[in-house]
Amino acid sequence: MQQVSVAAIVDARGVVTGWSEGARRLTGYAAEETVGRAARDLLAQEPPPGAVAALVGTAALRHRDGSTVTAVLRACPVLDAAGRPDRFVVTAEPDGRPEPTLAGQAFQQASMPMSVFDTRQRYLRVNDAACRRMGVPESALLGRPYLETVACAETDRSFAEHLRRVAETGEPIRHETFASAPALHREHAWSVEMWPVRDASGEPAGVALAAQDSSEQYWSRRRLALLNEAAAGIGTTLDVVRTAEELVELLVPQFADFATVDVLEWVLGADEPPARSVDEVVLRRVAHGSRTEGTPEAAVRVGERDVRPPSSAAARAMREGAAVLSHAGEPEFTGWQADRDARRPAGHGYRNRAHSMITVPLRARGTTLGVMVAVRITQPDAYAADDAVFAEELASRAAVCVDNARRFARERTIALALQHSLLPRGLSGQAAVEVVHRYLPCVSPAGIGGDWFDVIPLSGSRVALVVGDVVGHGIQAQATMGRLRTAVRTLADVDLPPDELLTHLDDLVTHLAGDHGDDVPELGATCLYAVYDPVARRLALAAAGHPPPVLALPGRAAEPVALAPGPPLGVGGLPFEAMELDLPEGSLVALFTDGLLERDADRAGAELRRTLAAPADSLADLADGALKAVLPEEPDDDVVLLLARTRALGADQVATWDIAPDPVHVAAARQAAAEQLAAWGLEETAFVTELVVSELVTNAIRYGGPPIQLRLIRDRTLICEVSDSSSTSPHLRRAHAYDEGGRGLLLVAQLTQRWGSRPSGRGKTIWCEQPLPPG
């Protein structure tokens, strides 16, 4: 059936001057009833804003029978000789009327949203798919500028700018935008193609666009981007809690509105996973996060235990080793909501808000460590199968980082326990120096290092101060440190001078490196060994590749000791040089490892010297203040600081006699010793002391050489020393029945607490110690 055109002519004043048969059929008014009347009288209501200026729009026409007819009006201006609009030919199509052409029907029925705009970004045509996506009819859009129909967000303004550019340049544009689709109650990604529509002269007369829903591709790319972010953003530290926090920060708000990470309790300790699993799951909350400030959705606080029943999604996910999807209305989800709502104060529950949840186990290297939960509340999309695949991949990567952190924490705990077991727990009793030590393990992922220190009492009230540092970190370095510390104690017991002791220690490190072969690429250490004599008030020291100590004399600034460091232990073939310093009583000696000065040696050294010279209430306060000033942050390497304040034995505590090399003077030596003991109030020790003096002086006269010297020291013990010029060291032996000698040292060993021999610059010294009488 041939369609009748609906048309009218309206002059510039808005008066109807022509009326077609189609117009009569549409409105019921004959030509004689409309010609000469104002066109506005034929409208049932005012046209949409901008429709008149756009010359197109939907209007409500008044029908002759009193009803209303909705039609799409288009106006075409007729120009006069001057080029001004003289009248308008207005055509009308009833709203909802089928397109008259196949091409129009294809446009209207296209599966993708399509629209046509004029050069001022006003709607001219909108197909059915676009209306469905926008949730409004075409009549509400025609003639209106694009920005009037949207919220004018940044993406909307960018969209309008693209329309303007196409109209002005005549060049097509393709871009992707992320915008909401009100009718679908969700956000969608759109791939939009815009192109110019040209008139007969080839000039752009409008802009057409088609939008393709690319949400699936967009979310796939977004999930891939999140996995890439996870590779760089999760596991930046070897800390279980921080790794869990990084996982939550990645999930919220991009993938979830609320997320939690709970781990099994053994993960946070030093234990291995239990051999037998139980149905009831006991978890510990280590991290959670929400897009809402304050995390109101959390029913379990960070650090708290949470017991999950066997029927829970967490228990099921850990049991099956796969992600579990839960949605609103399902029994599992409803039970989870009810449990959480019951544990939260009023107004903070999940009910009627959360609609989708995904629970994923944290599994690494075949071991289940915990569970990750992601919940959607404000995000309209429910979790689907592809989200489960993504969550499992993300959880798998995060679980490896959590397991690495767990293993590091366990190894660090073991290494730290080993380190503490190898270091002295309490410093041995001695009176030569007041000592305070500080040991700080490093926080480096490389592990605990091989730094050590020791304070070793020596004969004659002397004391040895030792600090050392083994190359490397971990169990191997600590094992080497333990062997070196034992070797130093053994060599110190022989009373070797510092340079000779380091020479023997260097040989030991060389042998250790040879024993390990190619298994250990590098084995070396540094060491500083110092001996302080409170009687002579002298410090002898030598170093093997170790930083020199800092010395603060009373009333003077602290300065590093000008000590030749020597090569590190294990280099071999080079000598070590010792030096001696005379120290007044109250001098402060600071020994340390290189970790104290590692970050900025010049600044740290200056801070250390300044702090050591400052007054302090105690040596412990001085050590703490020095560490705080030099190390404002946690160290990257182990740090040992050993402070020693020297004491001195006065003349009233030491008595010395030169002995002529003649046996007749032995009795005089015994008498002199007895008188000195009486002056000290130690008559109770006189009998044993006289026997010891007699034996040692007799041996020195008989087997040694002049000069011979006898010295008594009253310290924490009573010390008797006899020196001579012979370098031959005596040794105990069991005398046979007819032997004339060989019983002297055995008698000395049985009567005294300790005895020994040490070399001196001019020979040797035989010494022994007796306990002082009570009181």
Image: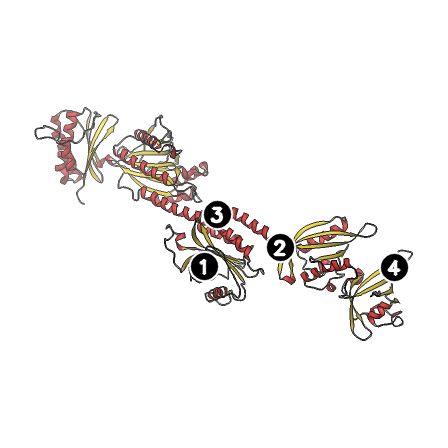
Label 1: which residue? 316
Residues under labels 4 and 3: Cα distance? 73 Å
**Mark 2 closeness class: few <14, some 14–19, many ≥20 residues within 10 Å:** some
Q: Which quadrant is home to the C terminus?
A: top left
Quick one: label 4 or label 2, which is nearer the N terminus? Answer: 4
Quick one: label 2 or label 3, which is nearer the N terminus? Answer: 2
Q: Secondary structure at mark 4?
A: strand
Q: Position of residue 561 (x, y in %)?
A: 37, 32
Q: Is residue 15 left or right of residue 464?
A: right
Label 3: which residue? 235
Looking at the image, the residue that sits furthest to the front is 1
**Label number found at residue 215:** 2
Of tags 1 and 4, the one toward the viewer is 1
Residues under labels 2 and 3: Cα distance? 30 Å
Q: Which quadrant is home to the N terminus?
A: bottom right
Can I make out residue 372 in this image? Answer: yes
Quick one: label 1 or label 3, which is nearer the N terminus? Answer: 3
Label 4: which residue? 78
Of tags 4 and 2, the one toward the viewer is 2
Quick one: label 2 or label 1, which is nearer the N terminus? Answer: 2
Q: Secondary structure at mark 2?
A: helix
Q: Residue at x 15, y 26 (%)?
A: 701
| 720 is higher (above) or lower (below) than 437 | above
Q: Is residue 447 left or right of residue 333?
A: left
Q: Secondary structure at mark 3?
A: loop
Query: Type of residue at label 2?
Result: Ser
Query: Type of residue at label 1?
Result: Arg
